[in-house]
Amino acid sequence: MRGFDHHEAQDILHDFLSNLLRLGSLNGTTEEKGRLRGFLFKALHIFLINWQRDRSRHEMDVSMHEPGLLAKAEERYLREQLSDKDTPDLLFARKWVQDRLTRVLLRLWDDYGAQSKDELFNVLKPALFNGGSLRDEGVITLTTSLGMNQVAVRKALERMLEDYRVILVKEVGQTLGDESEIDGEITALYQVFHQPV
């Protein structure tokens, strides 16, 4: 693919093919309909447009709105030294989970933007990254910046966490054939980052 380095192109192609399979896009293809190459070309073209849009939105969000979170991410990266127990399978699983969680966050951001709640989302997002806790966020500062009392801020965060969970369930549900497996899959996703060292 033009404009991408080798590893990035591999990641994009892998995501594209996994989306095709997950969504069942090739299920209705038959030899009589023909033009599989044209279908794949157009589907990849649309996928690349969406991928670049999501990537630029994510980069903009991190670079413009989250200098503190970027520093925290750098600290976390330095703490997360790879060990002998970090197998390629585990690293792949972590990357896959991170991609799913990024998609959930972008959908949540879009939902709040559609409701003209961008400011609320941006103010409460650090608490969301902190596991849903306002402990380190300075509740007084949040209440002042939002013009809300503490109870209202806590309730808004509670709603945001519930919205996040609903979107997460939908995202995970798209990867499964049976809805009864969703809770187990979410637990498995959580465990990917809490493997014993």
Image (spheres, grey):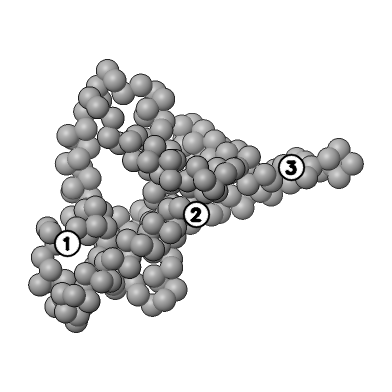
Q: Which residue is mark 1?
A: 134
Query: Residue at horizontal 51%, vertical 33%?
Result: 10
Left or right of 21: which side holds 168? left
| Pick the front one: 49 or 29 | 29
- The residue indicated by pointer 3 is 27
Viewer-proximal residue, 57 or 84? 84
Q: x%, y% of residue 106? A: 41, 58
Please say if 113 is above or below 62.
below
The residue identified by callout 2 is 170
Relative side of 138 to 17, left or right:
left
Place of residue 183 in the rendered image (x, y in percent of width and height, measured from the top left): 43, 45
Closer to the N terminus: mark 1 or mark 2? 1
Q: Is residue 57 visible?
A: no
Residue type at mark 2: give it: Lys
**Which of the two labelled residues, at mark 1 and mark 3, occupies the earlier sequence position?**
3
Place of residue 136 in the rendered image (x, y in percent of width and height, measured from the top left): 12, 58
Q: Secondary structure at mark 3?
A: loop
Disc 3 from disc 2: Cα separation = 22 Å
> Mark 1 near mark 3, Cβ–Cβ under 8 Å?
no
